[in-house]
Amino acid sequence: MSGLLSAYETRKRILSQELSAQEYVSAILEKISKFDEQIHAYTSVQEDTALSQAKKIDKKVERGEKIGLLVGLPVAVKDNICTKGIPTTCSSRMLENFVPPYDATVVEKIRGEDGIIIGKTNMDEFAMGTSTETSFFGVTRNPWNTSYVAGGSSGGSAAATSIGETALSLGSDTGGSVRCPASFCSVVGLKPTYGLVSRYGLIAYANSLDQIGPIGRTVKDCALLLDAIAGYDPRDGTSVQSKGKYLASLSKNVDGKKIGVIDELFGSGIDSRISEHLHKEIQKLTDIGMDLEEISLPTLQYSLPAYYIIALSEASSNLARYDGVRYGLRAEDEGLDWKTSSSKTREIGFGHEVKRRIILGAYALSAGYYEQYYLKALKIRTLIREEFREALKKFDALVGPTMPVLPFKIGEKIEDPLEMYMCDIDTVPINLAGICAISVPCGFIEQLPVGLQIIGNAYSEKKILNIANAYEEETGYTKYKPQL
């Protein structure tokens, strides 16, 4: 296991002209050519455009012109985030040939900060999955062991970042889809507070839960990308102003920070090896000046069923737009009425997992079941939000495992949806509460990565980034990278 240059360090070298953007982008493209046939992190790569942009950025640096935060850094974008002129497929047959006429706000911001869109990354179809096995284009493999999954649904983004096929990447997190693959691939993944990053141009799964988040090799990398993408967007009514300066605010001084260790995140379903390992790692927080205390958040036991009722209900509504009429796939419909044609389009356009979630969501919203399921789930969501709010009045942050299991073998869980859904048990509460959380590498078990999850109150990204940064500096786990 050897280190890779972080985006933060690369940026400094490009600014000092020790390294040109063209050289760096060429090196990244060489790695994609070398590794991606095996890893399958990308659905498309923008080689010519990326090199052309790098050349323009080098000229700006040479002339001493004003340059952006992401100067010369390649950024891989999850394939459910719209990119003008570049296919955006959601890894689904339904959108196999869809090319958006506009950029998502986050993509606009990255380009405006002199970042380079290197390509689109593979994902679970319509972001519905925990392993990137439901992609129409095939599974993404874990760079640490290619027999294992990379996590999901942002598996391509995390895998590409882990193996060095990009400097930074974007994922989306509805119930853990940034943090899960970050944990499985030993990179840093941040789920921002709901509304901190604009969702304009993100193809919706569950609107009240979705959040775009950064993935990097280090905490500094995540802070750098968050600085570039956070902030108010008039095209997203849920977005808020950002105070920014996440990178500049990073500090190793966390003396006296009070950390709550959530008992329920170590509950039923967690691998005993992860529980033992995480408790040892969490104790290291005391070595850098923090105080630990175990706490109980009993309502979290209801978070998984509440999450899936809400998420699937919203998904069934959002995916109704794919009817073969307005855009996307259209089944051959000569002589067919609209209802039959639409049904046939959805039958061949969606994969098994997407169909399952549409059916379950439609059932939860149907007459006679709305109050029994969906309304109760919303009430539980409120209780979870209040429980976190009260706990975070006492503590600076809360901690626990990111994932209850180690990366599993490809094909091991895909035929058991319930077992796959259970993998989300430690991440979904944060999305229900709308608060922020970060997954940071915390070592290995049997040479497979493990992630530590640090949870903060709404808009306390600076606080959890500081804690994660101090832990990262103390342990050095982000220095290790996979060898293929």
Image (tube, rainbow, N blue to C red):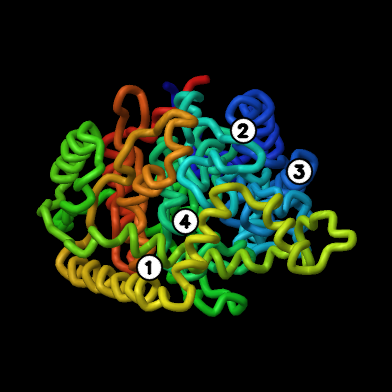
Identity, as a three-letter code, of the amino acid under mark 2: His
The residue that mark 3 highlights is 55
Instruction: Kindly report the distance in space between the C-alpha atoms of the residues bearing marks 4 and 3.
Output: 33 Å
Residue shown at 43% from the left, 31% from the top: 412
The residue that mark 4 highlights is 173
Identity, as a three-letter code, of the amino acid under mark 3: Lys
Where's residue 398, x and y in %? 22, 56
Figure check: 142 above or below 214: above
State which mark lies toward you, 4 or 3: 4
- What number is the disc on residue 40? 2
Residue shown at 44% from the left, 63% from the top: 245
Where's residue 97, x and y in %? 78, 51
Residue 306 appears in the rendering = yes
Q: Residues within 10 Å of mark 2 (few under 14, many from 20)?
A: many
Which is more N-terminal, label 3 or label 4?
3
- CB within 8 Å, label 2 to label 4: no
Image-quadrant location for residue 246: bottom left
Instruction: Kindly report the distance in space between the C-alpha atoms of the residues bearing marks 2 and 3.
Output: 27 Å
- What number is the disc on residue 434? 1
Q: Is label 3 in a helix, a strand or a loop? A: helix
Identity, as a three-letter code, of the amino acid under mark 1: Gly
Give the number of marks.
Answer: 4
Which is more N-terminal, label 4 or label 2?
2
State which mark lies toward you, 3 or 1: 1
Residue 188 appears in the rendering = no
